[in-house]
Image (spheres, helix red, strand yellow):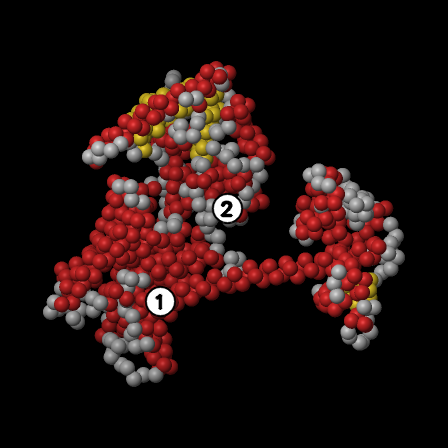
């Protein structure tokens, strides 16, 4: 339907946006968004189609580690573009399409041939073909520009891309490729998945691996060739790689990767053509790649799973957690030293236990209060003299966590001495770290192995479930209880 | 049918990579219900044998028949466990996705996997105790767990003949025991299993039959007949290396002659 719409460019007034130079920024934005100009519409629609086809094929390129191959393919098409142009003597989309496709496929054949017949490895073969074909293409282009029809041809647009120079035919061709890419992904979804992941296995279950590779190769070539005018030979490979690599940072599933990659491709294309439009038809390619690359940078830092910032936040959280747990453990130990006769500990005692200054201990106590693990009874004055005597008592949640940590610590010490044959004075340091990461499953396993122990290697009682339920300071002998978890 | 074709028949199989022979004139007939261990030194062509049977590598001579048919016609009757290192474990697929691949041969070209296929995949994951991990990306698994995913995928193929390439490589003791039990169970259900194995000492207890391979098929038969000092010496000892050395030199010389290089 859209194609029909675009077959009537006469409906609009201005065909070239580049002609108008004195418009301001907001007006240009309005013109772009309103899609009043045919050139703008072509550019927008072309960007969308390009985003779809490059995003989808790019997903496979990145997942199959074919990035270098995509780069080579995109440069190898240049002589084909030039020859197609030379042959038709105009910017005939079909002639250029055929020429570029043939050149691209020829490039891949040459790579395979070099690899097979010589000892030159694949990466070098790819580099050879990339530069060789590209050089030939540039030479022919130079020749063309010196011919009489060469100047106004717009062939130079193929180097860095100019979305505004897309004709309706170009856009139609791009649409066909985008539809083809969508069809390919729908029809061959599972075949492409298994060949990409494990080619040997794919062959063993009867998937026509060669055919799939051929489909992917031809589709990839089409996607590159039709995108050339919008993004340019130099940077088209970025449109294959960057959106898909961004998606790869964000997901662990092929389906989602393809979807995200398409979205990033489309968005990058649109931002790129908009940026180029604002700057009065600067080359589109760099803008598109810039937009895609900024998506990548954002995902690199802020991705929920693999992003640097998220990782940093997670690490900070963990450090905070460990500090909480250490303070609560210290509180437990102070209570234990007093035979659990009191319900609260002074901040001064905590500081002494942890070998900290009173101010540090006070700050940690305040953090515990904020997190709901403890309450603090103190005078209204601040300063070390008053903090010293402030009394910290654990809430039920805090008490439970403190018991768990101490229990983890002592179980682990016991495990190391009994099962791993560590000396009793070698186990404390290790347990200091392990106590924070032992999950419930491991703790139960340890209990089973150690037969629900009561005392650690140093003779201290291991807190049990009863101790947790009892709460702080209500009994004098925690070792009276049995296991941490109720027996069946 | 009077004559029932054996699960696997190999005749005069010769395979070479870049003109260097890897397998040389291998003959073997594997009976139904056999649990065969394939052993031999590094570079003996064990993996190549499996890959050639699967049609992944094309032989230079000889043929392979699966249940009396060429491989292409028996696709759904063969299950395959490739070497663990042969794939990229960072690939964006989940454990479930990988096991479902075992159903692709049954689903057919361009068809989607059915609900039944998913049920089978779940059952197979359960058999190898990997069901709790079904949504996990495959890179976030231990080596033993990854191997069990590959086994579940092979189980999902519901085949009669299984070819496994080093399923015990780099797995923990618990997984090793689980795999052995699985192999025994499959064998008891009448399946035929051919397993490449790197450890001679455990091969004796894991398998019923042994295939001793070192470019040539040294011996193939019941454990008590093949696990003899003489045959093992022949397989691992120095004598056969002369064969591969000479073959390699011959291949090298023809290469040099072709390229007109007088140096050797």
Disc 1: CA contacts within 10 A as few (<14), some (14-19) or many (>=20): many
Residue A288 circle label: 1
Q: Which residue is mark 2?
A: B138
Note whether residue A101 is visible.
no
In the image, taking residue B230 as reference, residue A283 lies left or right, namely left
Q: Position of residue A44 (x, y in %)?
A: 33, 69
Q: Is residue A228 visible?
A: yes
Relative to A65, say whether A225 is above or below. Answer: below
Q: Which image quadrant: the C terminus of chain A?
A: top right
Q: Chain of mark 1?
A: A
Q: Name the quadrant containing residue B32.
A: top left
- Are the two marked residues, 1 and 2, in contact with CB atoms closer than 8 angstroms? no
Residue A325 relative to residue B156: left or right: right
Asked which quadrant contains residue A415, the reply is: top right
State the separation of the CA atoms marked 1 and 2.
Answer: 33 Å
A90 vs B77, left or right, is left
Q: Is residue B139 left or right of residue A183?
A: right
Report the residue at 25% width, 65% height from top.
A159
Identity of the residue drawn at 75% across and 59% down: A354
Q: Quadrant of the N terminus of chain A?
A: bottom left
Residue A266 percent coordinates (x, y): 37, 64
Relative image position of residue B212 (x, y in whole percent) = 43, 22
* Image-quadrant location for residue A418: top right
Q: In the rendered image of this protein, does residue A141 appear above or below residue A217?
A: below
Q: Tag 2, which chain?
A: B
Q: Hey, which residue is sitting farthest left in the picture?
A: A148
User: Which residue is at a point 83% across and 68% down the rendered structure image?
Assistant: A389
């Amino acid at each position: 339907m859209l194609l029909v719409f675009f077959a009537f460019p006469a409906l609009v007034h201005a065909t070239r946006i580049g002609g108008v130079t004195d418009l301001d920024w907001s007006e240009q934005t309005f013109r772009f968004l309103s899609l009043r100009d045919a050139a703008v519409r072509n550019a927008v629609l072309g960007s969308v189609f390009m985003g779809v086809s490059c995003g989808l094929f790019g997903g496979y390129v990145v997942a199959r580690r074919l990035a270098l191959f995509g780069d080579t393919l995109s440069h190898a098409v240049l002589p084909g573009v030039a020859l197609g142009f030379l042959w038709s003597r105009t910017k005939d989309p079909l002639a250029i399409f055929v020429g570029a496709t043939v050149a691209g496929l020829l490039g891949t054949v040459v790579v395979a041939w070099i690899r097979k017949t010589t000892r030159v490895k694949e990466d070098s073969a790819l580099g050879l073909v990339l530069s060789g074909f590209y050089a030939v293409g540039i030479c022919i282009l130079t020749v063309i520009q010196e011919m009489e029809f060469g100047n106004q041809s717009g062939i130079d647009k193929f180097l860095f891309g100019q979305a505004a120079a897309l004709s309706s035919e170009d856009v139609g061709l791009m649409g066909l490729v985008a539809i083809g890419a969508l069809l390919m992904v729908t029809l061959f979804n599972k075949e492409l998945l298994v060949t990409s992941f494990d080619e040997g296995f794919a062959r063993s279950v009867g998937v026509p691996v060669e055919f799939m590779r051929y489909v992917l190769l031809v589709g990839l070539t089409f996607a590159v060739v039709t995108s050339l005018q919008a993004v340019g030979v130099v940077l088209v490979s970025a449109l294959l790689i960057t959106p898909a690599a961004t998606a790869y940072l964000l997901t662990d599933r092929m389906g989602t990767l393809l979807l995200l990659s398409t979205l990033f491709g489309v968005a990058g294309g649109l931002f790129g053509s908009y940026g180029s439009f604002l700057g009065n038809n600067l080359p589109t390619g760099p803008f598109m790649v810039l937009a895609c690359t900024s998506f990548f940078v954002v995902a690199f830092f802020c991705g929920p799973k693999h992003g640097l910032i998220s990782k940093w936040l997670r690490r900070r959280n963990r450090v905070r957690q460990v500090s909480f747990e250490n303070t609560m453990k210290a509180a437990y130990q102070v209570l234990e030293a007093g035979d659990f006769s009191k319900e609260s500990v002074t901040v001064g005692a905590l500081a002494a236990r942890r070998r900290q200054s009173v101010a540090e201990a006070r700050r940690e106590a305040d953090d515990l209060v904020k997190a709901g693990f403890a309450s603090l009874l103190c005078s209204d004055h601040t300063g070390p003299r008053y903090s010293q005597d402030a009394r910290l008592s654990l809430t039920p949640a805090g008490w439970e966590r403190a018991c768990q940590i101490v229990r983890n610590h002592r179980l682990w010490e016991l495990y190391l001495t009994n099962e791993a044959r560590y000396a009793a004075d070698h186990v404390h340091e290790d347990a200091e770290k392990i106590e924070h990461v032992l999950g419930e499953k491991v703790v139960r396993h340890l209990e089973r192995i150690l037969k629900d122990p009561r005392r650690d290697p140093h003779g201290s009682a291991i807190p049990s479930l009863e101790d947790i339920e009892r709460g702080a300071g209500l009994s004098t002998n925690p070792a009276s209880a049995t296991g941490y978890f109720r027996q069946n | 049918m009077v004559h029932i074709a054996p699960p696997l028949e190999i005749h005069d199989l010769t395979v070479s990579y870049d003109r260097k022979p890897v397998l040389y004139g291998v003959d073997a007939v594997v009976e139904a219900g056999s649990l065969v261990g394939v052993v031999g030194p590094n570079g003996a062509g064990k993996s190549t044998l499996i890959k050639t049977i699967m049609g992944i590598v094309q032989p230079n001579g000889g043929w392979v028949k699966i249940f009396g048919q060429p491989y292409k016609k028996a696709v759904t009757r063969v299950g395959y466990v490739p070497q663990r290192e042969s794939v990229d474990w960072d690939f964006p697929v989940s454990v479930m996705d990988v096991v479902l691949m075992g159903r692709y041969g049954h689903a057919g070209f361009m068809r989607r996997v059915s609900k039944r296929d998913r049920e089978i995949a779940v059952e197979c994951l359960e058999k190898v105790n990997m069901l709790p991990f079904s949504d996990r990306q495959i890179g976030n698994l231990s080596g033993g767990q990854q191997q069990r995913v590959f086994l579940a995928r092979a189980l999902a193929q519901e085949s009669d003949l299984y070819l496994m390439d080093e399923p015990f490589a780099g797995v923990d003791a618990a997984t090793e025991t689980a795999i052995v039990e699985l192999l025994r169970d499959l064998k008891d259900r009448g399946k035929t299993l051919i397993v490449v194995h790197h450890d001679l000492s455990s091969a004796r207890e894991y398998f019923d039959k042994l295939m001793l391979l070192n470019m040539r098929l040294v011996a193939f038969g019941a454990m008590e007949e093949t696990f003899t000092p003489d045959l093992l010496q022949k397989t691992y000892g120095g004598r056969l290396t002369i064969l591969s050395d000479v073959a390699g030199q011959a291949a090298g010389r023809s290469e040099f002659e072709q390229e007109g290089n007088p140096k050797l």
